[in-house]
Amino acid sequence: MHYKKWVLITVIIFIIASCASTRKSNREIENAMKQYDHLIKKLDADSIALLYTPDGNLGNIVTGRDSIRKFLSSFKNVEVLSQSSSTESISIQKDSSMQKGKYWQTDLLNGKDTIKVKGTYIATWVWIPKQGWHIKRMLTSPIK
């Protein structure tokens, strides 16, 4: 009897641990966006492109990792001095999520002109097993 109770407890713990490891949380989305902010600041086109799904969409500008990488690599005269974002809402439905928020960025153009931009964003994320959250679509709108 004692052995059966121990086996049952072990099975329950295993089931709970399995569910916890596949559960999706707002914190995971927040962390993925912070990584995105970090890579934008570095203007790391390769790593940014890899945060997107293979058919990911950067606004209505480019689609697909190769196109995203090529587009971001074209900003040779831009140095991102700061990049931050804040989340206003996150909704998770199974293996996808929609995140809405605001962003702020300061850039140095041609090594001499500083500009500050801010706006809102809507990020659609998709969970890829064994890889985590990836951006399916990122839409931004500037605000004054």
Image: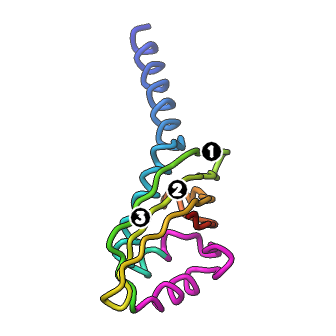
117 or 35: nearer the eye? 117
Quadrant of the image occupied by residue 126: bottom right
Q: Residues within 10 Å of mark 2 (few under 14, many from 20)?
A: some
* Mark 1, secondary structure of its residue: strand
106 or 25: nearer the eye? 106
The x, y position of residue 21, in whole percent, is: 47, 42
The x, y position of residue 113, in whole percent, is: 36, 84
Q: Which mark is residue 37?
A: 3
* Mark 2, secondary structure of its residue: strand
In this rendering, which labeled residue sits more in front, label 2 or label 3? 2
18 or 40: nearer the eye? 40
In this rendering, which labeled residue sits more in front, label 2 or label 1? 2
Does 56 appear in magenta? yes
Q: Earlier in the sequence, mark 2 or mark 3?
A: 3
The outermost residue toward the top is 1
User: What's the distance in space between the residues labelled 2 and 1, CA to CA?
Assistant: 19 Å
The x, y position of residue 80, in whole percent, is: 36, 76
In this rendering, which labeled residue sits more in front, label 3 or label 1? 3
Q: Residue at x 50, y 51 (%)?
A: 29
Q: Residue at x 48, y 26 (%)?
A: 11
Q: Is residue 116 above or below residue 63?
A: above
User: What's the distance in space between the residues labelled 3 and 1, CA to CA?
Assistant: 21 Å
Report the span colored magenta. 49-76
Residue 138 visible in the shown view = no
- Tell me which amino acid carries mark 1: Ile
Q: Which mark is residue 92?
A: 1
Q: Residues within 10 Å of mark 3 (few under 14, many from 20)?
A: many
Q: Is residue 98 above or below residue 11?
A: below
Task: Read off the residue under disc 2.
Answer: 102
- Tell me which amino acid carries mark 2: Lys
